[in-house]
Image (cartoon, rainbow, N blue to C red):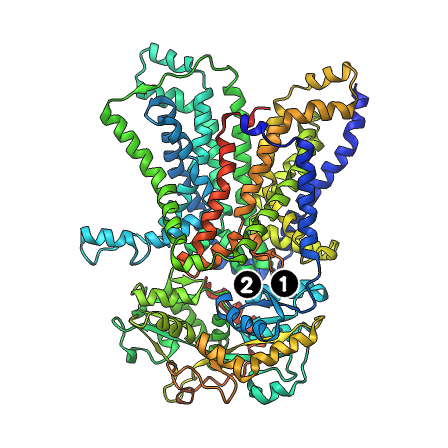
Amino acid sequence: MLFVRCLPTLSQLVLSSLLFLFTAVAFVSSAPAADSLTIYSGRSERLIKPVLDAFTATTGIQIQLLSSGTTELLNRLKAEGDRTSADLFITNDAGSLELARTAGILRPLNMREIDRAIPSQFRAPDNAWVGLSGRFWIVVYNRTMVQPDQVNSLLDLADPKWKDKIAIPNSGSEYLQAGVSVIRATYGEEKTRQFLQGLKANADSQVYQKSSQIVDAVAKGQVALGIVNHYYIYRHLAAQPDAPIAALMPDQQEGGMGAIMNVAGIGIIKSTKHLDSAKLLVEFLVAQAGQKLFAELDKEYPLHQDVRADPALMERKNFRAALVPLTRLAELREPTLALIEQVGLR
Amino acid sequence: MATIRQQLASPLQLLALASASLILLPLGYVTAQALSADPVVWRRLWATRIPELLFNTVSLAASVAVVTLILGVSTAWLLTRVEIPGRRFWEAALVLPLAMPTYVLAYVYSYLLGFGGPAEHLWQLMAGPQARIFSPHSFWGATLVMALDTFPFVYLLSRSALLSMNVSFEEAARASGVSRLATLWRVTLPLMRPSIAAGLALVILYVVSDFGAVSLLRYQTLTYAVFQQMTGRSDNSAASILSLLLVVIALIFLITERWFRQRSRFYQTTGRYRAPERHRYGWLGTLAVIGYLGLIVGAAFALPASLLVRWSLSPEALTTIDSRFFGFIWNSAILAASASTGGVLIGLPLAYLACRRPTFLNLSCLQAAYAGYVLPGPVAALAVLILFTTVAPVFYGSALILIVAYVIHFLPAGLQSLEPALQHISPNLEEVSRTLGLGIRETWRRVTLPLVRNGFVAAWVLMFLQTMKELPATLLLRPVGFDTLAIRVWMEASEEYYQLAAPSALLIVLLSLPALVLLVSKDWRAA
């Protein structure tokens, strides 16, 4: 009772809290400063913030970052339309960027810096989105539990002998969707269905939200194998060099489909009011300095021809990538999702 | 008199109608979208996901209900009927788990029980190097975490039932030669049944709408699946179908709870004449009781909290405590304060009208306000989002939209303390004030409001507490640069950066404590 008595009177309470309410609204709807960019990012904050901080340090342009799921942010951009406060969209998947482009969210760019730095297969025809770094969807295995010659292709992972021994990302993950799209485009519907059914049975409850968790589970020996983007393996090894894990580049056998590649990329939102600053950021990210940061921090393959990948990574010229163009990932998405749902992946 | 009351009611009535419709809109939106979805989607979901999700959700709710029933009733009985040293301490300590959001407990337990974690090491020391314990990322893990987190609901309600129960019933049974155990079984427990049922219904509602724990423990329930569908798919028809199922399940439990609450009046017509006697156990018995209570409080609060403190003091975690961190605190505080204020302002007319003028319309408005309970966070978020883009696009991307989602979602929590506070005031008091010459407004200001103030404050604090912990709606609706403490915990914990998640988690727990003080202070319901 004493506690309650000490509280301000009711009207004071109401007044002060109304004040709260209005400040909260005013606080947020106030327009961002001129030298500031708002970025919706589908990449995990840990992987993108250091690069953006470097940009702020060189240009003085502040960055407001909203990190969330790629598809979720794409949905959000569609719903927000021209009213969005976002100036740029960064994702971990070319398919999502292409979907954003076809939805008319992104702005075509005519910049010599892009043409010079990034090969044309890694960007949209009109440069509405530009790839920044390449990643491969590969197998991570525990060296004490698996011999590397036991797996040649991703499709081998559907073999019942891996029952309860593999970990996979959940079906909302854009890498998984892109990977399944590539497999479907290469091998057709039926074979992909069988693969997914086998994968589902083998993984059972080992379905993870984050790739870093998959690598962790493999390193601990909780499972023997996992499918992840390559850089999660090398980032884990950089932090814990003694971890008993290794990367396995799948589908390199004679006549195999090649490793599944995707890019993380960026696009400028059509309705941006900070076009010059936004262009400056794109320029920074495709230039050698920016590309080097991606290579060093994130262990990805830089797309700039003159920037070398981290030496710990498999040499890029030593393996083949699958032949499905990145821009096709968008049109392949819907039927892939239907298949994933039919199979009932989590 | 009647006409005067009518005058007072009409603007209030409009307000109540407006609030009720605002709250019902999201539910309507979800239902419409689910029912208009392509039958192919329905069939596909029935053939693939729905059976598994339904089974998982219902079985988790059932197992958590059983565990909380045992924990909640046994602790309440021990604390009201047995004399143990430090009783006041235990009474408070048993409520502490409510300050621990499910996702925090989930992440602590996924470390403790996880593969290669401390619990497994300990077990391997005893049972050999190959021994494994059950994985926390499973049905049992989810049960453990949810039960430890929610049993205080059952404890609190059982305890108040035991305290307000007329002891004469038990004494009459004992005097008629019924054994102590049989009295417990045949008299005490049946008398507690309405309270226990209400507590269990709360627990079950909590479990079916929980997102934080099941997402971190990777246990597939309907709510988690809705979030996954929303974040992984470009159209929301599958998400809305799953939501509709969820709403139906939750509705069943909400109605059950209401039904039992109504029946409880029947049982508790007689006041209590004196406090029940507390038995005194021998030292062995006392020790066993304390060990039991200590184990529960340790597992549900002390151990997780001390781990959070340890992690927060680690060098990795200390580097994250910078100006950005204080920004997260500010965001959490301002969002929660705004939402709870909005909730009280909207809830008061609804509750007042339902109490004073229990017409069909007014009662329906009040029931509508409870809709938030059956809308899982992700669905409430989506519906509010669409609502705003079509009705008031100006507010898009502002915190307002998130606050509206919070109000819809947490209004029931507030109403549950506003409603009884109003019910306890006799209308005679207002009538006396009117006959003594005070105007309508004056009466409202000087009689009614002061009388409901405590209920008001309790409602505000409860909504504040819940909002601050909220996760899925915040994830989906937060404006740019508006990460809250809860978001930080989830982002770090979902990548298993336990240390980095700890400072935010610890702070949420600490900020929740004052609200709990209010909850346990005996007078909080008294008007």
Q: Looking at the picture, how far across and down is residue B107, in whole percent?
A: 41, 53
Q: Quadrant of the N terminus of chain B?
A: top right
Q: Is residue B348 above or below residue A197?
A: above
Label pair 2/1, CB-CB below 8 angstroms: yes
- Residue denoted by label 2: A68
- Residue denoted by label 1: A76
Q: Is residue B406 above or below residue B275?
A: below
Q: Quadrant of the C terminus of chain B?
A: top right
Amino acid type, label 2: Ser
Q: Quadrant of residue B40?
A: bottom right
- Give the numbered dot on residue B481: none
Q: Quadrant of residue A169?
A: bottom left
Residue drawn at the location 70% of the way across and 47% of the way down: A22
Q: Quadrant of residue A87?
A: bottom right
Q: Looking at the picture, how far across and down is residue B48, in whole percent?
A: 47, 59
Say whether disc 2 or disc 1 marks the residue closer to the N-terminus: 2
Few, some or many residues within 10 Å of mark 2 (<14, 14–19, 20+): some
In this rendering, the label closer to the viewer, 2 or 1: 2
Q: Nearer the viewer, residue B242 or A64?
A: A64
Q: Looking at the picture, how far across and down is residue A294, in whole percent?
A: 49, 77
Q: Is residue B37 above or below residue A258?
A: above
Query: Callout 1: helix, strand or loop?
Result: helix
Residue B408 visible, this angle: no
